[in-house]
Amino acid sequence: MTDWGLRPGRDADADGFVALIGACWSLYPGCVLDVDGEEPALRALASYYAGQGGALWVAERAGAVVGMIATKPLDGGTWEICKVYVAPDLHGHGVGPALLAQAEAHAIASGATRLALWSDTRFDRAHRFYEKQSYVRSGPIRVLHDISNSLEFAYAKPVNGIAVLDAAAAASAEVRLSTVLRACVAEGAGVGFLPPLAPEVARRFWLDTGRNVAAGTAILMAGWVGGVLAGTVTLALATSETRPHCAEVVKLLVDPSVRRAGLGRALMSRLEAESLRAGRTTLFLDTRAGQDGEKLYRTMGWTALGTVPDCVIAADGTLASTAYFWKRLTAEPVS
């Protein structure tokens, strides 16, 4: 049971907002809150966000503001998440996730197709929080030219859809990608690991994938359902002189909680489109024979090369077969 609750923010909460932000910024050297010089909207913050077409909420405990968050619409279906602060003594008590869920739900109900935010490069705890909530780094660092000499990371995520991750986004997605990988392995997916998959092993795999993305030898895609990063697939680009037109599909993963909702097909369709853009027209993959992946590939026009019996060890210790497929891309990908 919590001793705090959420409610809409009010202009009368101004002193509480100033005290809360000041307490949070005091944890980071060089962060200076100049309300009248740089943050005058704090004096009437509810009116400010209402005027922007957005909304503001607070977490309150014993009459004091102990958390806050706001959201407002931008262009093209993007809503920005703003002013996310939680009192330091309540970090880890569920206030942040509750506030973020409130703001995201409001934005999505208002038509948001993409959610975005900015976070000071010094706020490392906040970065871990956003990454756990399926946000990934997006775009260049922003320079504010303020009294605190602030630099900010951009984070974003689609509500539903697929995105190609660059090296920075891949690094910031490691936590969620590892969670998806471990969930799939626990369910018996034939993806090269046996359960239980240790968190550090999963993280190491995605770290290596991120290095390949940075080196230009892999294209990493992630898929979101309801604002949650729930699936991924990687295109490994052949690097030999004799195979400049070839690539391999690696680790198509869909979290078991959202399977059979079309995410796997959407990821593969996007992979084929990205393969064409990269000039890779001959693709290969392998999958555990008899699993859902094999059925998906057949319906998307992949050609079976054959099956190797007793090729891998399954989760129960028995030997399982591996099926091999190929596909030549000559037109738009199958959807």
Image (cartoon, helix red, strand yellow):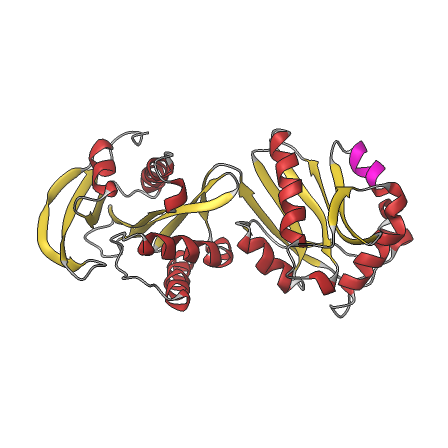
Q: Can residue 37 be seen in the rendering of this structure? A: yes
Q: Identify the residue at the far front of this view.
A: 1
User: What range is drawn magenta here?
Assistant: 46-51
Is residue 328 in view? no
The x and y percentages for residue 8 are: 78, 40
Q: Where, by quadrant of the figure, is residue 272 drawn?
A: top left
Q: Residue at x 71, y 37 (%)?
A: 72
Residue at image location 38% in from the left, 34% down from the top? 261
**Quadrant of the image containing the N terminus:** bottom right
Instruction: Identify the residue at image location x=56%, y=33%.
Output: 113
Q: Main secondary structure of the magenta part?
A: helix
- Image position, residue 141 (x, y; %): 63, 55
Q: Where 324 falls versus 273 (above or below)? A: below
Q: Position of residue 302 (x, y in %)?
A: 20, 37
Of 326 and 79, which appears nearest the observer?
A: 79
Q: Is residue 49 magenta?
A: yes
Magenta highlight on residue 272: no
Placement of the C terminus among the 4 image quadrants: top left
**Count of numbered circles in the view:** 0
Using the image as rendered, state which of residue 221 and residue 110 is in the foreground.
Answer: 110
Compared to residue 57, the image places residue 333 above or below, namely: above
Examine the rendered structure and indicate whether residue 177 appears above or below residue 124: above
Q: Residue 181 occupies which quadrant of the picture?
A: bottom left
Query: Residue 163 location in percent, x, y?
Result: 46, 42
Q: Is residue 40 left or right of residue 284?
A: right
